[in-house]
Image (cartoon, rainbow, N blue to C red):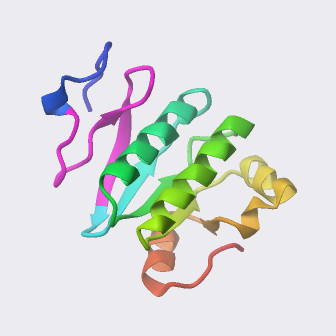
Amino acid sequence: MPFYSQGPPDSCRYNIRGCLDRVNLKGEAVKTEDITDDTISFGLQKEPQMNGEIQAVIDIAAERSGYNVILDFTFVDIITSSSLTKLLKLRQTVMASGKRLVLCGMHPFTRSAFEVTGLNGVFDLAADKQAALEVVNSGCLAGT
């Protein structure tokens, strides 16, 4: 995806059918992937970039409701309280449209932050993207 030092021009903000191109607060492209017609996956980077990426996903979810969202934490090793707060806001935004937010690919240290805070009972968690997609399609909870 392109890198925009000052953000993309308005005409480049979205490419809806191939991928959703959006930049975080530092102008870095947020990695997205269309998995199905109603599910989009976002690969997150490490902190502090992750915070801006989650905000970009919130913006996308608010502007284009009707998508399940899968967040891939494969490259995330720690998570800040600010990012946890933004994840709660993202969950609220996605659920308001009747869709699901599933978090996947967490390292044990990151997952322990969710367990210590009790958020593992709030968010749907899955081992990987394929398991997350199964959670979205089955409607069952993936908290384990």
Quadrant of the image containing the C terminus: bottom right
Vertical order, 57 against 52 (above or below): below
Vertical order, 18 against 25 (above or below): below
Going 51% across and 77% down the picture, which residue do you hit?
135
Q: Nearer the viewer, residue 102 or 43?
A: 102
The total number of labels drawn is 0
Going 76% across and 55% down the picture, which residue do you hit?
114
- Where's residue 90, x and y in %? 53, 52
Going 60% across and 26% down the picture, which residue do you hit?
48
- Magenta-highlighted stretch: main secondary structure? loop
Q: Residue furthest left?
A: 11
What residue span does the magenta drawing correspond to? 13-34
Q: Nearer the viewer, residue 137 or 68?
A: 68
Quadrant position of residue 97: bottom left
Q: Give the left or right position of residue 47, taking residue 102 as reference.
A: right
Quadrant of the image containing the N terminus: top left
Asked whether residue 80 is in view, the answer is no
Quadrant position of residue 29: top left
- Where's residue 27, x and y in %? 37, 21
Asked whether residue 17 is in view, the answer is yes
Going 51% across and 64% down the picture, which residue do you hit?
101
| Residue 54 part of the magenta segment | no
| Residue 20 part of the magenta segment | yes
Q: Residue furthest right?
A: 116
Q: Residue furthest top?
A: 5
Q: Nearer the viewer, residue 111 or 69?
A: 69
Q: Give the left or right position of residue 135, taking residue 82 as reference.
A: left
Quadrant position of residue 17: bottom left
